[in-house]
Amino acid sequence: MSGTLRPAVFGVCPVLETPFTEDEEVDYASFGRLIDHLVSVGVPSVMYPGFSSEYYKLSDSERTSLTTFLIDRVKGVQGFTTVISVPDHATHLAVRRAVEAVTAGASVINVLPPHQLAPSGGAICDHVRAVASAIAPVPVILQYAPALTGTSLDAAVIARIARDLPNLVQVKVESVPPGAFITALAAQSPALDSVVGYAGVQLIDAIRRGAVGVQPGSSFVEIYLDIWSAWQGGREKEAIDLHRRLLPYISYWMQSVELIIAAEKRISRLRGLIDTERCRAPERRLDSEEEAMIDRFLSEFEQQLLPIDKLEIRP
């Protein structure tokens, strides 16, 4: 772990989806209900906004308002970690947004490096350094998602930033596959903790290599909690078997970002966590077989995925 700071994220840290009304306005009531559900099932942290939040379809004012709403909603939850993601491509704007989030009460800042127009590796590093420096000593997670962004960094370069800025404590690894990069980060000086994203498709390999957390979506987080609990409790076969059952579904949905967003929103709507499954246009529309696949998924994992009327959700 970088420096003496504890892991920024440990265990299951879902990325919140952004609920919309049928006319594609932000649905704050559903957003609050979803947050409360995640707190009630015992996740220790959440992240917002990420790819699965449709951050790229939100206005600046919406992002600010939703971020503030989240921070305020969990303010009284003891020990809860709020990870606010900063995906802005302009360094000036990323620094300003990170400072604003920390001022509002964010626990951790996740930095998604700029990737439009393929900036050089040096420019990407300068961007990460500027954000981390501006909010030190608040912990920073660097999101490394080459499959989604085309950004290319290596573990040694990231470790050099962490040596200069010890509040860079963790890397969210979304390379495909992530295992080798997780191992490389752990071998650096300082050794860097990893959390794995990409819906946890390679979760078991990532845990074996030392990943300290996973960042899935938010519609069926109970399954990830059960996998994590089983592994941490020494019931490795149980964790592997449950992940093996999940894998055909998440492997299919992770064929594209918009596909898994649509699938997760449908699951959340069917469970009663949000009111609609609306995604902002242009969106990926599920066909009848994909909808049937979701029905099979909910049936197979019925034990874990109770509808909201059977869950304890605070008002």
Image (cartoon, rainbow, N blue to C red):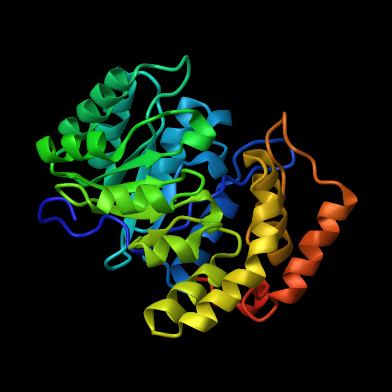
Spot occupied by residue 116 in the image (x, y as percentages of width and height):
47, 19
Q: With 181 as the anchor, is 240 left or right in this view?
A: right
Q: In which quarter of the image is residue 22?
A: top right
Q: In which quarter of the image is residue 218?
A: bottom right
State the residue at coordinates (37%, 59%).
Answer: 74
Spot occupied by residue 145 in the image (x, y as percentages of width and height):
45, 38
Q: With 300 as the anchor, is 119 left or right in this view?
A: left
Residue 107 visible? The answer is no
State the residue at coordinates (49%, 62%).
Answer: 203
Q: Is residue 158 above or below residue 244?
A: above
State the residue at coordinates (27%, 19%).
Answer: 122
Q: In this view, does 139 lie above or below 149?
A: below
Q: With 138 as the anchor, is 248 left or right in this view?
A: right
Q: Indicate the quadrant containing the N terminus: top left, top right, bottom left or bottom right.
A: bottom left
Q: Is residue 118 above or below residue 217?
A: above
Residue nearer the viewer, 200 or 291: 200
Residue 142 visible? The answer is yes
The single residue placed furthest to the right in the displayed view is 288
Residue nearer the viewer, 52 or 78: 52
Spot occupied by residue 260 in the image (x, y as percentages of width and height):
66, 48
State the residue at coordinates (17%, 44%).
Answer: 167
